[in-house]
Amino acid sequence: MTDYSAGECPDDEPVPYIPEDLYAQRVAERARRELFLGAVKAHLEEQPSPGAVHAAVRHWISDITALGEDVARKKRSTS
């Protein structure tokens, strides 16, 4: 038995019923997401004004959407 109540288990401890390979995949995906968001945040903080921040956000959204559409199109063509 642990000292945690429901929902309080730390993220860095594997849950016993999740296979180790799935846990490792989850950790890798979370790390990749954190690195990406950190890079975006750093880029936004470099902007000189609130307007420039909003413009940069719009560019990030546009670029990410285009990437997603491209990946989805490729997956549709291979399946």
Image (tube, rainbow, N blue to C red):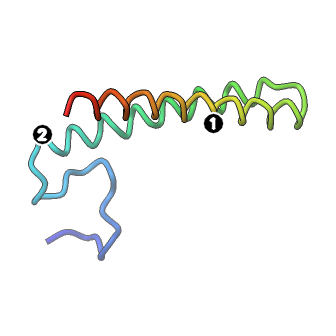
Reading the image, the residue beneath label 2 is 21
Q: How crowded is mark 2: few (under 14 residues within 10 Å), some or many (20 or more)?
A: few
Classify mark 1: residues with Cα within 10 Å, few (<14), some (14-19) or many (20+).
Answer: few
In depth, the one of 79 and 26 nearer the eye is 79
Query: Disc 1 to disc 2, how far (Cα)?
Result: 32 Å
Q: Is residue 68 above or below residue 8?
A: above
Quick one: SS at disc 1? helix
In contact (CB < 8 Å): disc 1 and disc 2: no
Q: Which of 68 and 26 is in front in this view?
A: 68
Disc on the earlier residue, 1 or 2: 2
Residue at left 46%, top 33%?
69
Image quadrant in which you'd find residue 78 = top left
In the displayed structure, would residue 75 be above or below residue 19?
A: above
Question: Which residue lies most toward the bottom here?
Answer: 5
As drawn, is 24 to the left or to the right of 35?
A: left
* x and y percentages locating residue 56 in the rendered image: 75, 29
Mark 1, residue position:
61
Name the residue rendered at 35%, 67% in the picture: 8
